[in-house]
Image (cartoon, rainbow, N blue to C red):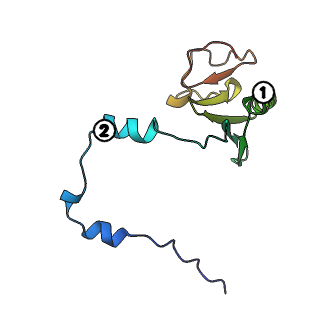
Amino acid sequence: MSKKKKDFPNNFEAYRAAPHQFFESIDFEEFMDWKMMGWEIPSSVAAIVREQDLNTGEVKEYIYNTLSGANKRCKRIMKESKSEFLICTHDDIAHMFPTTKLKEGDSIYDHPDIGQYDGRFSDDGYDGSEY
């Protein structure tokens, strides 16, 4: 019989028992700027690439101390055209996915070139320039 793993210790009860005055309210815009635009990576890391295989769902993460290494990895992923990936640098985060995997009606993948694959990748936050 296998034992269930213990949960990580946390302070949930202490937070739950604390009065609401202990927590400062912030509006949604400020929260999004803080959590979504406030990423930090160590100075020794130039880029982080997280790749997800679209067929198996397997996720792999690669950490690079030079941008040239990260660029090589991104080019390989784009050439294989079977995975989506996120690349994070000190300045930007980009989500890239092959245009062959666009799904009609899926708001993340809404794109004017559905069905017209020309070997390029799409970026959900980019202006559409070629890579």
Mark 1, residue position: 75
Percent across and percent down for residue 32 are 38, 37
Amino acid type at circle 2 is: Phe
- Residue found at the very far top of the displayed protein: 129
Residue 53 placement: quadrant:
top right
Mark-to-mark CA distance, 1 and 2: 36 Å
Q: Secondary structure at mark 2?
A: helix
SS for dot 1: helix
Residue shown at 59%/29% (left/top)? 94
What residue appears at the point 67 percent right and 87 percent down from the top-left corner?
1
Q: Is residue 32 above or below residue 61?
A: above
Which badge, 1 or 2, is on the more N-terminal residue?
Answer: 2
Residue 28 circle label: 2
Quadrant of image for the C terminus = top right
Which sits in the foreground, 15 or 118?
15
Horizontal arrangement in the rendering, residue 104 relative to residue 120 (left or right): left
